[in-house]
C-alpha cells in the first residue's frame, strides 16, 4: 500500500509499525467522525479496512484514554490512547507528530480538501 511505503521510507519504521500506526489514526477518526463521515475517508483511501485491523489491542493506555475522554479531557484522552497504541507497536509517542502530517497529506492527495478537513478535525 502506498501510504504504508511512504511511512516506512520517511520514518524508518517497519511495515507492521506503519500499518498499526496509520490504523490507530484512522481508528480514532472512525470513532470521532461516525460512520457516515468516516465513509468519505474510507472511500478515498483504498485499504483503510485492512489498516483498522492492524490496530494493536488496547492496553492500559487505551483504558486511560477512554477514562480521560469520559471526564471531558477529549484531546488528552485521544493522545493517551494513541500513545499507548504506538508504544505497543514499539514506537515512541513522539512519532505521532510525524505520522499525522504524512497521513493527512496522503488523504488529501487521494480524497481532496473535503476529506482532508474531516481527518484534520480529528487529529488537530
Image (cartoon, grey):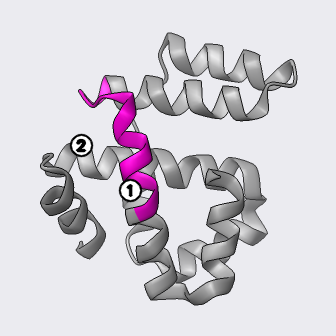
**Mark sitting earlier along the chain (2/1):** 2
Q: Is residue 75 left or right of residue 22?
A: right
Question: Residue 10 location in percent, x, y?
Answer: 19, 60
Label 2 crowd bin: few (<14), some (14–19), many (20+), radius 10 Å:
many
Q: Which residues are magenta?
A: 88-101
Query: Which element type, helix, strand or loop, lies under badge 1?
Result: helix
Task: Tell me which corner region of the image, top left, top right, bottom left or bottom right, holds residue 91.
Answer: top left
Q: Is residue 45 left or right of residue 35?
A: left
Question: Residue 60 location in percent, x, y?
Answer: 52, 10
Identify which residue is drawn at 72% across, 60% down: 121
Height in image: 62 above or below 55?
A: above
Q: Is residue 4 left or right of residue 44?
A: left
Q: Which residue is mark 1?
A: 51
Identify which residue is drawn at 77% across, 58% down: 34
Identify which residue is drawn at 12% across, 49% down: 12
Q: Which residue is mark 2?
A: 17
Height in image: 14 above or below 92?
A: below
- Mark in front: 2 vs 1: 2
Q: Which mark is residue 8?
A: none
Most common secondary structure along the magenta stretch: helix
**Mark 2–mark 1 distance (CA, rounded to whole Å):** 11 Å
Task: Tell me which corner region of the image, top left, top right, bottom left or bottom right, holds residue 21.
Answer: top left
Identify which residue is drawn at 74% across, 15% down: 67
Is 53 in the magenta?
no
Q: Is residue 78 left or right of residue 51?
A: right
Height in image: 102 above or below 27?
A: below
Query: Which element type, helix, strand or loop, lies under badge 2?
Result: helix
Question: Residue 71 location in percent, x, y?
Answer: 86, 18
Amino acid at each position: 500500500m502506498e501510504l504504508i511505503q511512504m511511512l516506512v521510507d520517511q520514518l524508518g519504521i517497519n511495515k507492521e509499525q506503519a500499518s498499526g500506526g496509520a490504523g490507530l489514526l484512522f481508528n480514532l477518526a472512525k470513532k470521532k467522525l461516525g460512520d457516515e463521515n468516516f465513509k468519505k475517508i474510507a472511500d478515498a483511501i483504498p485499504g483503510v479496512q485492512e489498516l483498522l485491523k492492524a490496530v494493536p489491542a488496547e492496553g492500559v493506555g487505551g483504558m486511560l484514554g477512554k477514562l480521560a475522554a469520559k471526564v471531558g479531557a477529549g484531546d488528552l484522552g485521544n493522545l493517551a490512547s494513541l500513545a499507548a497504541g504506538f508504544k505497543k507497536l514499539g514506537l515512541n509517542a513522539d512519532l505521532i507528530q510525524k505520522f499525522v502530517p504524512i497521513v493527512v497529506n496522503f488523504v488529501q492527495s487521494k480524497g481532496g480538501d473535503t476529506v482532508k478537513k474531516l481527518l484534520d478535525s480529528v487529529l488537530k
